[in-house]
Image (spheres, rainbow, N blue to C red):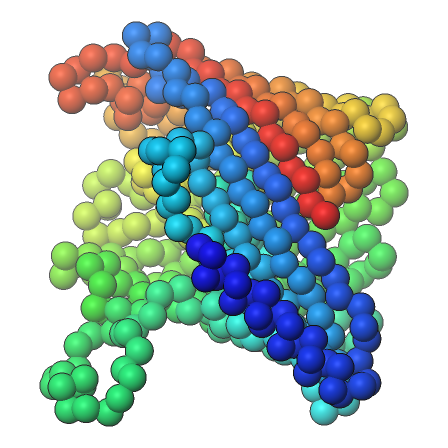
Amino acid sequence: MNKIFYKLIFVYFIISNVAYSQGQVSDDIKWFGTVYLRPELDARDFSNQTHPYFITMQRVAFGFEKQIYPNIFVYAEAMDSRIWGQPQNPRKSIMNLDLHQGYLMFINILDMPIDLQIGRFEKEFNKKVIGPSNWQDVPRAFDGFDFKFKINSNWDIDAFYLVNSFQTALIPSTLPSAYPYPAPADKGVYAYGLTSKIKLSKNAYIQPIAMLEVQGKGNATSYDKLTTALDYVNKEGNLDLWLHAGFQTGTKTEKNIDKDIAAWGAHAYLGYDMGTFKPMLIIDLNSGTKLNDQGTKDNTYFHYLGNKHAFWGIADYFNTITTGTANFGLNQIAVKLNYEEKEPFSAYLEGSYFMTNVPFTNLDGKESTAIGSEIDLVFKYAFNKKMFIDWGNAIILPSDLWKALYRTSEGTKREDIGLYTYLRFMFNF
């Protein structure tokens, strides 16, 4: 851990000396960081016979941004993430300080309206498709590059390539033994695509995206999945509207069985700001797979690289939507009421009803689509836009699917009310 820290400081001083020798760059160094803690009480197993779990997640990050040459910037961020008690000993270290982000940013390459971000970085496109998922203990960062073509002040196009798992370890020298013959199948996991953000006005835009995800055939499960989606966001005046429509196609190979992974999804978030209160209506649809088709198809609309916790309630039953719905897909209907009289206090109350997208057979042998309901109440105190404390509470009422999924192998039913609460400290500087 200390070695990584010293290396980060060493890189900083090298960059500072290079910048000084150029004599043409800004002397400003932007230091930044994050301290994030989230104690939570977890009683989401629908059983009054078990005790709730109490855990605390902690994340601390620090870094800097520096201009090292006209139109060239370097960005580095180190991060430590842990669960309280994870070292198992007050004098033990889990040695997990990591370079979470580290990249170069080239602005207006060759005096053309093209930017290049290359290295390891957080990225968000269309929220549901690609995002850092900042709620998690370790936010998602990608290795790769992103070319941004700035057509005009209202229109950008991004071409990106992300490597999520490498094909093979680095070959340090060209020895015959380092190159097995025949070459093993590719174990890499990649994503690449195009997206564009087109501003229709100051607070309204559309964003199409096309992304191909590839998992090499050297893995236990391989796939080629193409996602195409279109988002429309409008926050003009009192209106708050977000529409999403997406389609996925491709093939997943698992245990030598090829599965069709065609899927679709759509959602509509509609809110109207009335001053102190802003009511919202949320409808979110995600296709699923019929039970008789699950041997040859996987038609659940699922985004592995997208943001988590941004949808479907704060209790997070559907972060992995395929297992969270037994692959039957997810439909959500929710009503949300936001309250914000004056800063720094705000709150919201949200009630959601969850259904599968395709029917299943419940424990009584009847056809059903009912999953359950969730009521969320969240209070927030914001010191500024970057620093806040919020307290979230969820009451979860199980229905047919949750009762079936949480029934034990011995046949014990778990159908009591589920509870979840957290206290989150998010301080960015």
For this rendering, which residue is in front, 228 or 254?
254
Q: Is residue 62 visible to the viewer in this orientation of the structure?
A: yes
Q: Which residue is drawn at 69% across and 66% down?
A: 65
Question: Outermost residue, front direction?
Answer: 91
For this rendering, which residue is in front, 23 or 240?
23
Question: Outermost residue, top direction?
Answer: 49
Residue 37 appears in which quarter of the rendering? Answer: top right
| Residue 53, horizontal then vertical, whole percent | 39, 20
- Above or below residue 138? Residue 277 is above
- Above or below residue 171? Residue 349 is above
**Which quarter of the image is occupied by the N terminus?**
bottom left
Q: Which residue is drawn at 19% across and 48% down?
A: 295
| Residue 68, horizontal then vertical, whole percent | 71, 79
Q: Using residue 83 as the reference point, say whether residue 402 is left or right of it.
A: left
- Above or below residue 154? Residue 323 is above
Q: Residue at x 45, y 40 (%)?
A: 82
| Residue 42, horizontal then vertical, whole percent | 43, 21
Q: Is residue 368 visible to the viewer in this orientation of the structure?
A: no
- Above or below residue 180? Residue 385 is above
Q: Using residue 39 as the reference point, say whether residue 173 is left or right of it.
A: left
Residue 383 appears in which quarter of the rendering? Answer: top right
